[in-house]
Image (tube, rainbow, N blue to C red):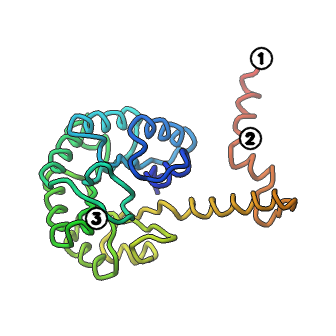
Amino acid sequence: MKRLAGGFALVGARYCQPDIDLIHLGERRAAVRDIMAGSSLPVLVDLDDGYGDVKNVTFAVRCMEAMRVSAVFIEDQRAPKKCGQLDDKEVIPADEMVAKIRAATAARSSPGAVYFIARTDALEAEGMRKALKRGEQYLEAGADALYVEGPRDDKELEEIGKTFKGAALATTMMEGGGKTPWHPPSEFAEMGYSMILYPTSILFRAARAMERAVADLRAGRRLDMKEAMSKDEFMKLVGLEYWQGVEKKFHP
């Protein structure tokens, strides 16, 4: 399991903005640092379109490696990019994305330093045939894995899986209104997918819980403990016992 620092969730939760190219590398780096400080799980970072040309992609990947990020992905949308599950996306020419992939993989200090996933948003913009062609080009350019955004039904999911059988393949399960039909991880694996991203499953539930909490406060209702943690449970979650141990061990 990896933590996903996805654009949609990160921009929405941290900055209360939609994922429409408002947030770039500086804001992304700050958020990723905080995420990594809060958990020991490896992190996969959504680097959008790389924030420019091959120079920007090179700098972005070097920044992520310096932060010890486990993996990144970059997409082939034309700026201003938007959430991959939204409509009316445009993509850059395939050769421009190939150049970005080569720059990204060359920016690493070693091939295993940062796992690199190439994402294409061409399925909606150009159709299945061209999206599959781009996928082949991106893997040939050196991407460690491929991420075809936005399959709209099982037929498309299966066609992508069969085309890239044996390759590391990712897809998004955007619960709560995404384009791709829901399947449990085992069924995605049977179709050929080794990475399933869940960018909204926790976010949307948390947002609804916060709305309900605000409504209760406005109505003067006390906290329903069936829908909340206790103080002791929360303190355990955030590691109070560990920090008490540090204080006890080193305090003069």
Residue under label 1: 252
- Disc 1 to disc 3, how far (Cα)? 57 Å
Residue type at the position of mark 2: Glu
Residue drawn 46% across and 57% down? 1
Position of residue 32 relative to residue 123, above or below, is above
- Quadrant position of residue 68: top left
Residue type at the position of mark 3: Val
Residue drawn 36% across and 61% down? 84
Residue under label 2: 241
Q: Earlier in the sequence, mark 1 or mark 3?
A: 3
Residue 177: where, in percent of width, then height?
Answer: 48, 71
Q: Which residue lies furthest to the top in this view?
A: 252
Left-right relation of 184 to 167: right
Residue drawn 38% across and 47% down? 21
Residue 70: where, in percent of width, then height?
Answer: 38, 45
Asked which secondary structure carries label 3, the reply is: strand
Asked which secondary structure carries label 2, the reply is: helix
Residue 139: where, in percent of width, then height?
Answer: 18, 57
Q: Earlier in the sequence, mark 2 or mark 3?
A: 3
- Disc 1 to disc 2, how far (Cα)? 19 Å
Residue 170: where, in percent of width, then height?
Answer: 33, 63
Residue under label 3: 148
- Disc 2 to disc 3, how far (Cα)? 43 Å
